[in-house]
Structures are given as structure tokens and as C-alpha cells.
Amino acid sequence: MTPQVCARYDKPTSTPVVVAIEHGASAGGGTVYACPGKCADSIPRQRDPFDHGTLPARHEPVRHTP
């Protein structure tokens, strides 16, 4: 794999690990890399936007204030 910049230390790593995918409306987003091991483990895991089981249930109707 091509060397990438570690998101934690902001230095190049020759063994990058994908830790997140950034989403962007106009720029298209990008991939976030980190060093394997301690760096990658220290970055919080992204929530899967397609996993509906992780979304809190709403029991009240949404009320709009005029």
C-alpha cells in the first residue's frame, strides 16, 4: 500500500490502516488513515450510517413551532 499520513501524529506511515471515511457534499470526502496498533486503536470507531439498529427510537411525534 502507498504510504499515507497518520491522523494521530500527522506523519507518514508505510503501513496505514483505514480508520474512517469522511463524507463531503461538494468535495467528495476522503479516507482517514492511522498507524497500525496504538494509533489506530486510539481513534473512535465510526458509526455505520446504514446500521438502523444503532439509531435511538423516537416515541414522540416531531412538533414544529410556528
Image (cartoon, grey):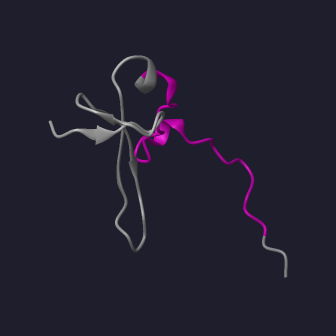
Pinpoint residue 32: horizontal percent, then vertical percent.
37, 44
Nearest the viewer among 13 and 66 is: 13
Residue shown at 67% from the left, 48% from the top: 58
Residue furthest right as drawn: 66
User: Which is nearer the eye, 27 or 56?
Assistant: 27
Name the residue furthest left.
1
Looking at the image, residue 65 sits to the left or right of residue 35; the answer is right
Q: Quadrant of residue 61?
A: bottom right
Q: Which quarter of the image is occupied by the C terminus? A: bottom right
Query: How many tags in the picture?
Result: 0
Magenta-drawn stretch, dominant element (helix, strand or loop): loop
- The x, y position of residue 38, in whole percent, is 44, 18
Rendered residue at 63%/43% (across/down): 57
Magenta-colored stretch includes residue 59: yes
Q: Is residue 40 above or below residue 23?
A: above
Q: As rendered, which of 41 and 15 lies closer to the eye?
A: 15
Indicate left or right for 15 with 49 as reference. Answer: left
Instruction: Write down the region rendered in magenta.
Output: 41-63
Q: Residue furthest bottom?
A: 66
Quarter holding the N terminus?
Answer: top left
* Residue 60 coordinates in the image, percent (x, y): 75, 53
Residue lying at the far front in this picture: please name it: 11
Of residue 59 and residue 18, the one placed in the foreground of this image is 18
Q: Is residue 25 magenta?
A: no
Q: Position of residue 53 (x, y in %)?
A: 49, 36
State the residue at coordinates (44%, 24%).
39
Name the residue at 28% across, 32% down: 16
